[in-house]
Image (cartoon, grey):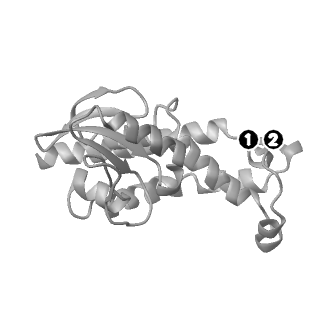
Amino acid sequence: MNNGKTDKWELLKRLIECFYEHFFNDVTVEDLDEKASNIFLKYLIGNERLSRLGSLLVTRLGDSKEQCNAPAMIRIFFDNVHNLQPPFDFEGILYGKSYQVKVVAGENTFNASSRRDTIDASRSYNNPIILTLQGRYFKPKHLTEKLVWLSAPSTWKLIAGQGGYKRFQDIVYQVASSYRERAWQLIKSRKNDV
């Protein structure tokens, strides 16, 4: 069983590498400049692109069209997985129990409209759950009698055991460090340079 988890962590590392590689192959300076200017951020840190880069990363993590997205990073820890109709991502078995899973990239990415759709869709499932890829801890939120939303630390504890979130963070840090220079080059570049 432990060897299977180790293999899943290696698969997770490859998915994170895939995510960053696709992200930096697709994102442009124009993507970072397309939002209206926030002069408070620009004059505070000298570059408003930092905030936009963060928004783009989270958006891409949750994008259902991306192959290396948040649901893909969570689903590798489940067995007997098959896709479900949106807004749910998949159904799978974890430690002998079947779950119908909706994955969100972070707590702030689960907007009211998506939440409402997820609550409505959850009524037809026996064991629906919302798992959060990354973010802060919050107590489990019971959105209906059956539907529970877990924070990122609780998600990783459920799918990978005690210390799961720390291990996930360590892997993201390791992979992200090799993309840091590309991120800064993109942030600092001028439109004419790209």
Q: Position of residue 92 (x, y in %)?
A: 23, 34
Q: Residue 34's quadrant in the figure?
A: top right
Quadrant showing the N terminus: top left
Residue tagged 1: 28
Is residue 14 at all visible to an observer of this figure?
no
Image quadrant where residue 101 sits: top left
Residue 194's disc is: 2
Pick out the residue farthest to the bottom: 44
Residue plotted at (15% across, 46% down): 3
3D distance between C-alphas at marks 1 and 2:
8 Å
- Whether the residues at callouts 1 and 2 have beta carbons within 8 Å, the answer is yes
In this view, 165 is above or below 59: below
Image depth: mark 1 or mark 2 in front: 1
Find residue 163 and report its image quarter: bottom left
Q: Quarter holding the C terminus? A: top right
Residue at 72%, 50% in the rendered image = 186
**What residue is drawn where x is 39% and y is 37%?**
120
Q: Earlier in the sequence, mark 1 or mark 2?
A: 1
Where is residue 141 drawn, in percent x and y? 34, 58
**In what element is the residue under mark 2?**
loop
Pick the front one: 25 or 70:
70
Circle 1: element type: loop
Q: Residues within 10 Å of mark 2 (few under 14, many from 20)?
A: few
Which disc number belongs to residue 94?
none
Q: Amino acid at mark 2?
A: Val
